[in-house]
């Protein structure tokens, strides 16, 4: 049997998080907040959504350019997992 395993990245800049998101009728996903280290952080605004690679932490997916507590953060949806860069 052939099995496909995703590569694991041990990069200190890649942080996985739980994300609360809204799905609209057309299937668009809008993240509203993320939970990291048991702290819920509200997403103030989203300025860009595009497919992109994370050159800093490895991986690729849909990149959301977000502002959280006034700081720009890149939040990625890679397959079914969310991660962000620091």
Image (cartoon, rainbow, N blue to C red):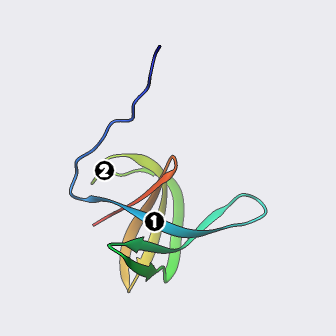
> Which is nearer the eye, 33 or 38?
38
Check the picture and name the quadrant holding the C terminus: bottom left
- Secondary structure of the residue carrying numbered label 2: loop
Q: Is residue 38 above or below residue 12?
A: below
Instruction: Measure the alpha-carbon separation of dots 1 and 2.
Output: 22 Å
Residue at 42% over, 80% down: 41
- Most distant residue in the right direction: 25
From the top left corner, tell me how far across and down residue 15 is, in percent: 31, 61
Residue at 38% over, 86% down: 69
Residue that badge 1 annotates: 18
Instruction: Tell me which corner region of the image, top left, top right, bottom left or bottom right, holds residue 6.
Output: top left
- Secondary structure of the residue carrying numbered label 1: strand
From the top left corner, tell me how far across and down residue 53 is, in percent: 40, 48
- Most distant residue in the top direction: 1
Q: Is residue 45 above or below residue 84?
A: below
- Along the polypeptide, which appears first: circle 1 or circle 2? 1
Residue at 27% over, 44% down: 9
Closer mark to the observer between disc 1 and disc 2: 1
Residue at 37% over, 46% down: 59
The disc placed on residue 72 is none
- Tell me if mark 2 has few (under 14), some (14-19) or many (20+) residues whose alpha carbon lies within 10 angstroms of its own: few
Q: Is residue 82 left or right of residue 30?
A: left
The disc placed on residue 55 is 2
């Amino acid at each position: 049997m052939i099995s496909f395993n995703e590569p694991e990245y041990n990069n200190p800049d890649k942080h996985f998080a739980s994300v609360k998101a809204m799905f609209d009728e057309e299937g668009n996903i809008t993240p509203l907040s993320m939970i990291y280290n048991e702290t819920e952080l509200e997403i103030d605004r989203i300025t860009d959504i595009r497919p992109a690679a994370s050159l800093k932490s490895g991986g690729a997916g849909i990149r959301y350019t977000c502002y959280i507590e006034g700081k720009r953060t890149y939040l990625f949806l890679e397959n079914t997992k969310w991660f962000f860069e620091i």
